[in-house]
Image (cartoon, rainbow, N blue to C red):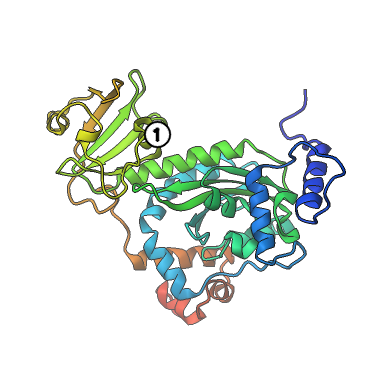
Amino acid sequence: MTPPSASPLPERSLTIAQARREWIDGERPAEPLAPRVEPWLVRSWQRCLAAGHRPQQRVSFDPVSAPRARQVAERNRALLLAARPVLDRLSRAIADTRYFAILTDADGIVVDVGALPSGSDAAARHARDIARIGVDLSERAVGTTAIGAALAEHESVWLHRGEHFFDDTSIYSCAGAPLFGPQGDCIGMLDLTGVQVVERPELRHLAASSARSIENALVQGHPCELLLQIGWPGSSVGADTEGLLCIDADGNVTGANAAARHMLHQPLGSRPALHCNDLFALPPQMLFDAARRGDPVLEVPLWSGLRVQARPRMPQRGAPAATAANPLPRLRDVESALIRKAVDDARGNVAQAARALGISRATVYRKLGRGHC
């Protein structure tokens, strides 16, 4: 039996190399062959070529400016709060694989990272090149990666080595999944990357399921008068397939997770908002009454004739886009956390952290409330 850590078949690397010659170098085969790579990957390569890029160009993983980094941190506070527990769990799950997690915003800017592989070898240094808060890892900056592909295609992806457009990024293998907010818009992505590692395409599923966990946390923290958990009859409480709906005092759906949108086949949470009357064949007041009584389960008919199992509950008032027990952090707290992370990544080298963040060393000391040494 082949062990799980066995190297991928040589045909995989040959397939990628042949596809690159055909689609990037323009060497058309003498006779038609079966597609060698995913269509979305070819589209990404073609976008890179259309932008005037060539695979041999050097790639620099530069952070955005300090003002923009602050804007990104402020805009993504709710995402950071929802994602942190998931990143911690992911770091434990992949600890022995030398893969690590990266969270970006919708523009591909890194907003948080999980635990990085330890060591001072080349692989660890390459990991630190990209796993830094504020680095631009969008397709326009670093070419084809799981990050750019997930944000462009709005689906989970897997890339291995030479499937990246630039030669400089061909040392990476990565899985990625897009993140959708309560309004249904793409707000970022979750990436799992390794450097010169064994190919593990199963990480695509882990990235996608972890992304759904982050999305669910965002919906559960979305301000609303009624949070409705829905599932097909017989489904278990808290299942990954459970739909979540945020409903305001007038019965409008103001937010939803992907499961709810798929179950009800509606663009829930978009503008203009759908009303409960458009979804359920019962008065919305019945849902509010059931929540106030604390009813554990309510069977609700849909206009299609299907029935769903609903668990209505009343969120605590005054929770601003987060749970009342875990309110959103203040901007200066988020900023300080990002600076501390940069200092940790630089192994305590404040000058190096300041350069990575694009700020002065004095600013690092001031933001962290430390005196000069």
Instruction: Left or right? Give the position of 363 relative to 127.
Output: left
Q: Position of residue 125 (x, y in %)?
A: 68, 61
- The relative height of residue 26 versus residue 298 in the rendered view (above or below) is below
**Which residue appears at 24% of the width and 22% of the height?**
301
Q: Position of residue 96 (x, y in %)?
A: 64, 41
Viewer-nearest residue: 330 or 40: 40
Query: Image quarter for residue 217?
Result: top left
Query: Quick one: which residue is furthest to the top in this view?
Result: 234
Query: Quick one: which residue is furthest to the right in this view?
Result: 30
- The relative height of residue 331 versus residue 214 in the rendered view (above or below) is below
Q: Which residue is mark 1?
A: 262
Tally the marks. 1
Instruction: Left or right? Give the position of 82 relative to 154.
Output: left
Q: Position of residue 331 (x, y in %)?
A: 34, 66
Viewer-nearest residue: 321 or 138: 138
Query: Image quarter for residue 215?
Result: top left
Query: Image quarter for residue 293?
Result: top left
Tag 1: Cα neighbours inside 10 Å, few (<14), some, or many (≥20)? few
Would residue 373 be seen by someone viewing this image from the given angle? no
Secondary structure under the numbered disc 1 in the rendered image = helix
Q: Position of residue 309 (x, y in %)?
A: 28, 23
- The relative height of residue 49 versus residue 96 in the rendered view (above or below) is below
**Which residue appears at 60% of the width and 59% of the height?**
139
- Report the amino acid beneath label 1: His
- Image quadrant holding the N terminus, namely top right
Viewer-nearest residue: 125 or 344: 125
Would residue 248 be seen by someone viewing this image from the given angle? yes
